Each structure stands twice: as C-alpha cells, then as structure tokens.
Amino acid sequence: MKSADLLTSAHTESIQAILDKVESSPLGLDESVAQARQKTFGPNQLPEAVSPSIVSIFIRQFKSPLIYVLLLAGVISLAIEAFSDAAFIFVVLLINAGIGLFQEYRAEQSAQALKSLAAGHALVLRGGEVFDVDARILVPGDIVLVESGAKVPADLRLIDSHDLSVDESVLTGESAVAHKDATLSLTAETPLADRDNMLFAGSLVNTGRGRGVVTATGLNTELGKIATSVLGRVATKAPLIVRMEKFTHRITIVTGLVCVLLVGISVTQGASLTSMLLLAVALAVSAIPEGLPVALTVALSVGMERMAKRGVIVRRLVAVEALGSCTYIASDKTGTLTVNQLTVRQIQFPEQDQWGVSGEGLEPEGEIRATTSLDQASADLLVSNLAQTMTLPNEAVLSQRDGQWEGHGDSVDLALLVFAHKAGVSPTQCLNKCPEFAMIPYESERQFAASLNLVDGQLKVFVKGSLERLLPMCNTMRCADGEKDIDPQTITQQAFNLAARGYRVLAAANGLLDIEVNANASHELTTEQLQGLCFVGLVAMSDPPRPEAAMAVANCRAAGITVAMVTGDHPQTALAIAREVGFADKPNEVVTGTQLQEAVSAGQDQFDVLCRGARVFARVEPQQKLQIVESLQRQGHFVAVTGDGANDAPALRAAQVGVAMGMRGTDVAKETSDIVITDDNFSSIVAGIEQGRLAYANVRKVIFLLISTGAAEVILFALALMAGLPLPLLAVQLLWLNLVTNGIQDIALAFEPTEGNELRQPPRPPNQGVFDKVMLQRMLLSAIAMGTVAFGTYYWLLKAGWSVEGARNLVLLLMVMFENLHAFNSRSETQSVFTMNPLKNKLLLFSVIAAQLLHVGAIYTPGLNEVLGLQAINWQEWAAMLVIALSLVLVNEAYKVWRVSRTQSLP
C-alpha cells in the first residue's frame, strides 16, 4: 500500500474501498501495525524552513544603512592613508558583527525551542480505543476524530460527518466555508475545492463533528504539495523593531546631512580635505547606534523566554510589548478562573428537593442520595432516565485503562459520564442498547446537544443543554408519578437556586419523534423537530475557583487592569464565582446575552454604556463576545481576551492580545491567538502581563542607554567645533568607546530582572510612544551632562597646557567611565542606583568590569595603544576622571528624586 496512490482517487472511492486499500477498519489500526507503518511512511509533518546558518546570520549583520556608513568611514580612512584607523574600524565592525551573530543565533535557537511547546495533537482510534496523540505519529489507515475548532492533521476520507463545515482557505484561497458530507460520491475530475467527502491537512473545522480514515500524511498530503511555497516565509517583525529601524535610518540620514553641513562650513574656513574627512568619520561613528536593532530583538526574545517559563507561549513578538499596555482582561470562566474539574454535585427533578451526589473527579466512585421518601423503584427510574438523557447526546469518552480512569473530551460531558456510572448506567451499554441514528453536536451558539436513538423500536430524541434553550422545547415534565404539564416558573426557580450557589446547571429533556424507522436510510435531526418534549431534570456541577485566582485578580486591580468574566453560564453561577474571586459583587454588575441583544437594537451608545459597568457577561453567544471586545476598544481600553473555541476566533483576532488556552483550546483558537497559556490558568495571564511590562521596560532601558550616550558624543563634538578646538576624539577612539561601553552592556540590560513594582503601576497608555516625556527628559539631561562635562574637561586640559593627544587620552577615559556608569543609571527610571543590588544582573556588572579592564589593557598593549592614541595614566588622573564621571550618577539621582516628588504632589 502506498499513500501517494490514494491522493488523486480517495474522493472517488467508497468508504469500504478506501478502508480496504489502507488495510484498516472503522475501529482503527492496532498499535503494532501503526508503529510498523510509522517506519515506512515517516513522521506526519512537513519539512520546516531551514533555520538560517551561522554564515548567513553573520553576513546579515552588515546589511544595514548604519553599517554602510561605518564601512564608508573605513574606506575614507584608507583613502587618506590612515591605514591603522581603517584597520581598526574594520576590526570593530567584525567584533560588532560577532556580537550580533551570537545574540541573533541564540534568539533563533530560543524561538525554535518554543515551537516544540505547541506541537499539534489528534484524536485517533486504535484498536477501538480513543487516544490523544502527537499528530506527527499518524499513519495512513488511522481513524481520526475531528470536531469544531480542530485543525485537520492529515488528509482524510470521511467515514461519517455531522453538520461538518471546514475552512480550507489555506489550500483553496476561498474564504467561504466548505460543507462536508461523508456520503457523497464524486468523480475523478472533481476539483480540490469541491471534494466535500474529504478533509485536508491544515484546514480548520468550523462546526460539527467527523470521523475519517487517513489517506495521506506529510509531504503526500495536498498541503505537502505546496509545502515549498509556505516554507521560508520571513517572520513578521515586531512593530517596535520596525519603528526603531526606521528611527535609526532617520539618524543615518540626519547624520549624513549634518556631516555635509559641517564639512561645508569647514571648507569656507579653509580646512584641509583630511581634517574634513576625519570630522565626517568621527561624527558618523558618534551618532549611529548600530547595535540598537539587535539589542531590541534580544530584549523581546528574552521576554518571550521568561514568559514561556511562566506558562505563556508567545506566538508573535508583538504580544510582548502589547501586554505592557493591557488595561482590560475579558476572561472566560471554566478552566481559567476555575480548576476545570467539573463534578456533578446535585440533581433535581420536578416536584422534588435537591439530591446530593458524592465523589470526586473522573473516578466513578460515589452515591446519589435522595432527600425524599420515594420508593427505591421510583427513585431509580428518575435517576436512570436522567443519566440516559445526559449520556446519549454526549461526545466524551471515559474508559478504564490499567486500573486508571481516563477521559477524552469536554469537561462537562466527562462529568456527566461519571455521573451516569454512579447512577448505574453504563454509557457503552446504553449506546449499544439505543443505537444512534442522528445527532446535533454541541456548539456554543446552540447551547444544547441532541441525539436521535432507537429505543424499543421507536425513534426517541435526547437533549441536554441550558435551561433557557430546553424549556421552550418541552410541554410536559417527568415526575415521580408520571408525566404532567410543565411548570416553567417552578423549574426556573429551581435552576436559579442552584446557580446562586455557584453551580453550573444543565437541563435534560427527551421525547418520542413521529418518524418512521428505516434502518437502511439516513435520518436527519433538526432543531425544528425538538418540540413537545418531556422535561427530565436538572444537573448541577461544581467547578471551584482556582486558589490563586483571587490573588491574581487583586494583582490586576493593583496594576490598574479591569477584569471581567465572559461566559455562557447562568448569570447566578457566574456571579457566585465572580464574588469568590473578587472582581464583582452586585447583581447590577451582571449583563446577560439577552440584555446585550436588546442594547444592540437601541444603538451603539447604549451598548457601550451597558458594557462599561459590567464585570460579568453571562449567557453570552460568541458573536456577542466580539461585540463586547469592540465596545471596550471604543471606550479606549487595550483588551486582552481569552478563548478556547473555534467561535472565539473573531474576538481573539479583534482583541489587541488574543489569549488561547493550551490545554482545552481548539486549534482554531490557538492559530488565531497571539499567546497561548499552557495551563489555562488566569494567574498565568497575569504573570504574562508582568513579564510583558518588564520586557517593554527593558526595551526602554536599552534605547535610553544607546541614544543618550550617542547624543552625548555628538554634543561633545559640536561644542568643540563651535569653540574652534581640535576634534576631542579620533574616529578610532570613538569606535573603541562604543565597543567597550555598548558592546555587551546594552544586551545585558535586556536581562534586567523585575524591579518588583511592575504590577503596582498603571498600564502604559496604548497610544504612548517609546519616546515619551520621561524618556526624552532623561535622555536630554544625561546627554547634556556627559557632553558638556566632557567638553569642559577637554577645554580645561588644553588651557592647562596639555597636548591634544594627552587631553584626548583623558577625555576618552572619562567617556568610558561615563558610559559604563550610565549603564547602571539605565536600570530603572524611578529607583535609586544605590538601592538596586548589582548582583541581580550579573551580566551587566561583569560587562562593565570587563569593559574597564579592557580599556586598561589597551593602554598597556603595544601596537593597540598606538592605533588608539592611548597613553599611560597615573592614579591621580584616574581618580580625577572617576570623580568627574560620578557627577553623571548624581545628576540622574537628582532627576529621579525630583520626578518622584513631583508625581506624589500631583492630585
């Protein structure tokens, strides 16, 4: 059997013919057969784009207008026969490229490691049992189960389908969904987009359920045919990186214009060509922060790594900086704010009190305790009827393997299967006794699931879902003494009482349908047929809040972030959880889907007013979740929204930060989101926000260090030129200065740990640029302080009779000290440098020490000291330059004190 032989004909074959060709059955392959085929067909994956080689990354370090200017400086040095200067410029360029190579290669390796945390999975039948497996081990002949929100893991010939629609735009380019039908027979000429009895790898299931046999894997799939066109796509750069690259390009242009202007001035003053070119080279080297793009990429990559350690997988670099601006979190409830360990705790029948159910988790150990004096036969009949109704329209799988109970599927369905076992109803036996003829699978828009089963020779429908949807379907209710006319008010009150205690409440109903049984024909089940049913009872499940959720919400409040719950649950259930977690307390903070629908009709302003005061959105439909996000954005919020279903995709896409659940999230949700939470825990989202704020703060620190030091060098040169003094530093000295002060210190700032107050500050305004008022004030103050003090020192040395070479020697030492001390000033915008433990960022401490030692070494290294124009310095001169350099620390400390006092005095 060869998988490739099936690619062009699978859609033309009957289901049985396909099963015969792949030597499989509806129960799937045996594990031993699957493992043998794995060796034949290899892993079910497309070849990934080859990571850039070390050589290509190294070459890429020179593809920048900034580097082009420095290369031009080297060429000019060669032209004027300043060979030692030219050699040093080229050596420094190589060293800078080496540093960039190391950092980019490390970031690339980290990105590859993060990909492994988001590997695809598939539900497969092997030997009649359902397994959740890595999609890479699928082989032709495997039977795969798909449902709404899933990503199709391989090419499949459908065996059966229920209301199945698929987004195949990745293959066909068509945005319209494709509706699938396993029963279709197609001709060989049927185009790919019309092969509606097939599912293709890479497509996304929008609605419904399906089961199919794998006909092709890996490169043999239709997606594999176009693999070469999807490989090698360049990853999108974060907006911050793009803005900074544009900024540095502008600096390059401005530097060029300034150089031309100053050279022109020098010409009018009769300066020589050599001096003019030296001036241009020196200015170019001073102004250009050539390491900025690489440093920012590293800063964001470090943020991604740190988030991953906290359970937050960043799929797009943009999310790192976006999280720092988050002002509103619209969170779902189940599994995010709660532990997602649903257990049936109470059941209630019409005209009865609540009955207790004991037991925990997936272990079907426990009992049902009736609170009335019903005889055992009547009680058993009520319970078995409820258990059967909750079991048949159920898509989960609960089984015992090696003495342990395992479950696959939705947590609600699993809890209901556990309850059925406790009630003495075996789901497997129930389905064998009452074979399924048709079904309506659960979708969040419907809020119910239904199945049509053959019971004692008649077709009977079983429905479970929200009470609001089921009550209109019923005209009778099942009581201990038989069926009676339904009492909607009493039943609604029963559900309200359960929900008010924090339970998640589901209703059950069933009834005979007047349909002739035909075993040889397919039967359709529609919503319109669900009328005249008998209400069976209520099931109340508990899913307690996560222990850490309350603290996480409190941290959000301290950080100025509003938290709201968006759920499909009953309003009272949602409010009870919100009270426990701590972000809502009053009934008027709850808004229902019905109220939202009415507000839409009243106009956008009314809808916004309704959303503004809400902290709990209950009984919300997926489309309304999108409307809520859009309303919050209109009100100026920067929204992070969580989701796990296919229908959450529009809201995830619309939000500034889409957060998908890693454990229970569908593939559609993960594909649409910006970040994935591996443990589905709300506290992980808050931890991600903290790390996002830290990453953005570290980006600002890197920018502050590089721009302020570069500006200081320009100020020093401008003042010397205006004073008619010789150049205070040579071009090679400036290159050396930038190498020993920014070669690794800027990267080290990207590893700066938390200051501890990230979640005690308000969010950064979404429209605030990197160069805000505080950043500009600090940069100008620091640049002016360094530049003017260095110029004053240079001027004094020359007036005191020092030679130009000797003055340059001391000014270079002063600037090395200035800029290395400034790395410590850059660690915080508010905290004093004297209160921050230098050992918390050992890389920064060691880089500064190494830079100072490197400069000392250069002074006493024959040859190098001649190229750099360095001379020996006595200890008095060292001490004098250190005292002068410390003035920069005092200036920055004074600014921080002034700013803090000014902030505290503001109302």
Image (tube, grey):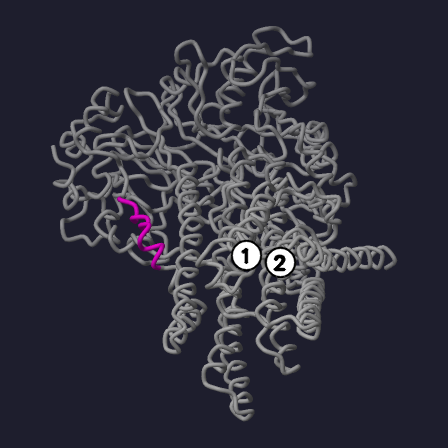
Give, as a single range, the part of the protein colored magenta.
47-59
Left or right: 372 as drawn, with respect to 137: right
User: Where is 426 relative to 37, above or below?
Assistant: above
Residue 613 position in % (x across, y down): 74, 51
Is disc 2 surrounded by few (<14), some (14 to 19) or many (20+) residues within 10 Å? many
Of 306 and 362, the residue lying toward us: 306
Q: Which quarter shows the C terminus?
A: bottom right
The answer to the question of whether label 2 and label 1 lie on touching residues, with beta carbons closer than 8 A, is yes
Identify the disc placed on residue 213: none
Q: Residue 607: in sight, yes or no? A: no
- The residue nearer to you, when weighing 475 against 575, is 575
- Visible in this render: residue 828? yes
Q: Quadrant of the N terminus?
A: top left
Q: State which tag comes first along the sequence, 2 or 1.
A: 1
C-alpha span from label 2 to label 1: 8 Å
Q: Position of residue 603 (x, y in %)?
A: 66, 63
Res 118 → quadrant: top left
The numbered disc on residue 742 is: 1
- Please state which amino acid type lies under the numbered disc 2: Glu
Identify the secondary structure beneath mark 2: helix
Query: From the viewer's perspective, is 553 left or right of 133?
Result: right
Q: Where is residue 174 drawn, in percent x and y?
A: 33, 58
Please give the residue where the numbered disc 2 appears in the rendered image: 819
Q: Indicate yes or no whether the magenta region holds residue 51.
A: yes
Amino acid on which disc 1 is placed = Asn
Kindly indicate the quadrant of the structure image that contains residue 578: top right
